[in-house]
């Protein structure tokens, strides 16, 4: 039994997801009830390793969330050893609470500079097949999870683009109002000088 499972054996439901940047992605969904723990391991293959400098990172935290990692801003993910960068574990009173905590933690987990499998895990956690517990070693192929991942990534890019346009418009209006106020103040100042 690994240290994580030993530490959290008393919890009702756990998710244990390894965030991996290279080949042999392993995702362990650990569901434990008081006395009969079971372990289901799935290996995701055919992902190219991503190495390099991590320029920025945000590690999630909070109740029912644990992260085992070496990541920090400025660290380097080396190509010379295991590409596992972090292990993210969530737990809760039941499966849905644990899943929601994992979903939120994955949204909060940010790694800049190297590619991660975080988007894949978000897609998996939101799939109805995962929620129903319809898991198997052919999960990715059988339910076309990678196709869903590509659709999710397209949708996310579109939403970020829309948000960027909206932010630009808001900032533009702010600047126009500020210029207008400065112009009015400038005119008022000149008018006061003319009166004296």
Image (tube, rainbow, N blue to C red):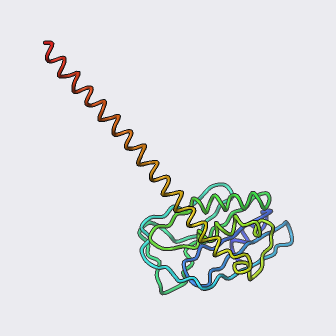
Q: Residue at x 60, y 66 (%)?
A: 152
Q: Quadrant of residue 90?
A: bottom right
Residue situated furthest right in the rendering: 35
Asked whether 23 or 189 is in front, the reply is: 189
**Count the marks: how many?**
0
- Relative placement, left or right, of 126 versus 12 is left
Point out residue 101 in the picture as x, y percentages from the top left corner: 68, 58
Quarter that holds the N terminus: bottom right
Is residue 186 placed above or below 150 in the rendered structure?
above
The image position of residue 146, as x and y in percent, is 64, 76
94 up-or-down from 39: above or below: above
Judged left or right of residue 78, residue 119 is right
The x and y percentages for residue 95 are 78, 62
Which residue appears farthest toward the top when viewing the image?
196
Task: State the residue at coordinates (69%, 78%).
Answer: 140
Q: Quadrant of the C terminus?
A: top left
- 69 with respect to 123 (left or right): left
The quadrant in which residue 96 appears is bottom right
**What residue is shown at x 18% (from left), y 17% (from top)?**
192
Where does the image place residue 151, in percent across and percent down from the top left? 61, 68
């Amino acid at each position: 039994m690994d240290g994580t499972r030993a530490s959290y054996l008393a919890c009702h439901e756990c998710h244990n997801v390894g965030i991996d940047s290279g080949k042999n992605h392993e995702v362990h969904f650990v569901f434990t009830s008081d006395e009969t723990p079971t372990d289901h391991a799935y290996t995701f293959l055919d992902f190219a390793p991503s190495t390099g400098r991590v320029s920025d990172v945000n590690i999630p935290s909070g109740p029912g969330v644990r992260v085992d990692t070496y990541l920090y801003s400025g660290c380097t993910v080396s190509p010379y050893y295991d590409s596992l960068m972090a292990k993210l574990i969530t737990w809760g009173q039941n499966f849905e609470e644990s899943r929601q905590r994992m979903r939120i933690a994955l949204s909060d987990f940010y790694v800049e500079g190297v590619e991660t499998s975080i988007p894949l895990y978000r897609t998996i956690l939101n799939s109805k097949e995962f929620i129903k517990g319809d898991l198997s070693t052919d999960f990715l192929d059988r339910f076309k999870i990678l196709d869903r991942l590509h659709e999710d990534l397209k949708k996310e890019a579109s939403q970020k683009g829309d948000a960027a346009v909206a932010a630009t418009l808001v900032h533009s209006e702010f600047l126009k109002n500020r210029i207008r106020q400065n112009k009015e103040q400038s005119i008022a100042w000149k008018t006061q000088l003319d009166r004296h």
